[in-house]
Structures are given as C-alpha cells and as structure tokens.
Image (spheres, rainbow, N blue to C red):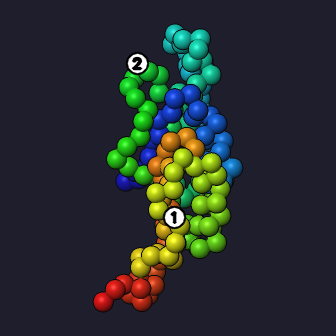
Amino acid sequence: MRIDVYLSFNGQCAEAFAFYQSVLGGELMTFPFSAAPDMPVDPALKDWVMHATLNTGEGIIQGADCPPEYGPSNPSGFCVSIQPHTVEETQRIWDGLTKEAKAVNMPIAPTFWSPLFGMFIDKYGQPWMINTVADEAFVAANTPQ
C-alpha cells in the first residue's frame, strides 16, 4: 500500500504546485473547478484547483484549493516529509523550497540519524521536513552511546 500526502490551499494551489515542480521536478497535473462537468462553480472560484498531482517518480504530492464551505485550509499536526538520497540533493531541495519560507523550525544540519535534516513552513503555509537517507553505518557511527 502506498500512502500519499494531500495538501489544502486557499486559492494558491496552482501557484504552489508549479513552485514545488520547479524544485522537485516531476510531472504535474491540475484540474480546475471550472473543468468539472455538471457542477455549479462560484465564478470567484472557477480558476481554483479541484485536484493537483505532482508525481516525482518516487512519490506523489496531491492537493486542492479548499472552498470555505469545506472547512479550513490551515495545516497542522503533520509535515510533508522528503527523503533525498544525497546531501547535495537535500541541500538543493532545501535551498529551493525554503525561498520566502514563513518559518524555519529547525535549520538544516547534520543529526545523529541523518547527514542533513531540517524543518520549515513554506511560503504557502505548508509544513515540511527534509531528511537525507542514511545507511546503518552512518547511524551507528553517530548515535550517542
């Protein structure tokens, strides 16, 4: 079974997913509310995204703009977690996604479990963590005794 993350936005989904694609790469598909057949759409929301998918080949991020009647779009209690395979890839993704970040909760730095780990809230209000994949030898060599 695969588990994916689904992000909610307040009118910025298309912009956010274009930004994520510019940093992460992958194939982006968006479906605006106005393209839904037989569904009345508030003219103010016609360009909002009903569904977006960014497929990076190793994972999928999905999302949509959340009209007010469907509840809040303020994320809490989770982070989008990315697991790059190299320190260089981790740093590149960090540098890209933290541009104009609302907050850096934990600056990117080595930890005992990973060569690089960091946490932030992106410019769209979405919480992220990035963690370079470490092998068992790295963890064993860096775990406090």
Name the secondary structure under disc 2. helix
Amino acid type, label 1: Pro
* Residue 101 against residue 91 in the figure, above or below: above
Give the x, y percent position of residue 49: 57, 28
> Residue drawn 58% across and 32% down?
12
Q: Is residue 81 left or right of residue 71?
A: right
Q: CA distance from mark 2 to mark 1?
A: 36 Å
Residue 30 or residue 104, whichever sits in front: 104
Splitting the image into 4 quarters, where does residue 86 fall? Answer: bottom right
Q: Quadrant of residue 44?
A: top right
Within-10-Å neighbours for mark 1: few <14, some 14–19, many 20+ = few
- Whole-percent x and y of residue 109? 52, 72
Q: Which residue is mark 2?
A: 69
Between residue 93 and residue 24, name the one nearer to us: 93
Kindly state the secondary structure of the residue where label 1 is placed.
strand
Percent across and percent down for residue 6 are 45, 41
Farthest residue to the right: give it: 22
Which residue bears the numbered disc 1? 107
- Mark toward the start of the polypeptide (2 vs 1): 2
Work out whether 73 lies above or below 37.
Answer: below
Quadrant occupied by the C terminus = bottom left
Viewer can see residue 96: yes
The picture places residue 35, in percent across and down from the top left corner, at: 60, 20
Q: Amino acid at mark 2?
A: Glu
Question: In front: mark 2 or mark 1?
Answer: 1
Q: Quadrant of residue 136?
A: bottom left
Q: Is residue 89 above or below residue 77?
A: below
Q: Nearer the viewer, residue 29 or 14?
A: 14
